[in-house]
Image: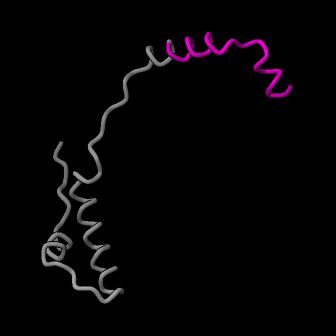
Amino acid sequence: MTAQESDAGHNSASTAEGQAAHRADAPEPKRHRAASYDRGVQIAAARLRLVTDSQLGLVTPDWVKELAAGKPRTRVS
């Protein structure tokens, strides 16, 4: 069976309606915060900048050094 044969009996409108109905029945996915709001990601990025600046011979700002020295917050359930 080829792709053309498999699509031969399908109407694009009915396929779209079926997909819309399926999405309406599916539970809504949980929304996550952007990674930039995650303290652990910020610390990891600051540490990466320390290494990169060092290799490139650039001066790293003090605020980046302070952030890189921090520890990620732990979640309390």
The number of numbered badges drawn on the structure is 0
Instruction: Return the x and y of residue 55 as percentages of the image width and height.
Output: 36, 86
Near-viewer residue (30 or 52): 52
* Residue in the image at 76% along x and 20% along y: 7
- Residue drawn at (57%, 12%), measured in percent from left and top? 18
Q: Residue at x 79, y 21 (%)?
A: 6
Q: Quadrant of the C terminus?
A: top left
In the rendered image, residue 38, in percent from the top left (x then y), is placed at: 24, 53
Colouring used for the render: one colour
Quick check: is 65 in the magenta stretch? no
Quadrant position of the N terminus in the picture: top right
54 over 48 or under it: above or below: below
Classified by dominant secondary structure, the portion drawn in magenta counts as helix
Residue at 17 percent across and 78 percent down: it is 61
View extreme (right): residue = 1
Give the camera-side residue of 75 and 44. Answer: 44
Query: In the rendered view, does 51 fall on the left or right side of 61?
Result: right
In the figure, 30 relative to 21: above or below? below
Q: Which residues are magenta?
A: 1-20
Q: Which of 66 and 77 lies nearest the eye of the viewer?
A: 66
Judge left or right: residue 11 versus residue 48.
Answer: right
Give 25 or 57, whichever is nearer the viewer. 57
Residue 65 lies in quadrant: bottom left
From the viewer's perspective, is 26 left or right of 55?
A: right
- Residue 73 location in percent, x, y? 17, 57
Q: Residue furthest bottom?
A: 57
Compared to residue 64, the image places residue 55 above or below, namely below
Residue 52, compared with residue 30, is above or below; it is below
The percent position of residue 49, horizontal first and vertical second, equals 29, 74
| 10 is within the stretch colored magenta | yes
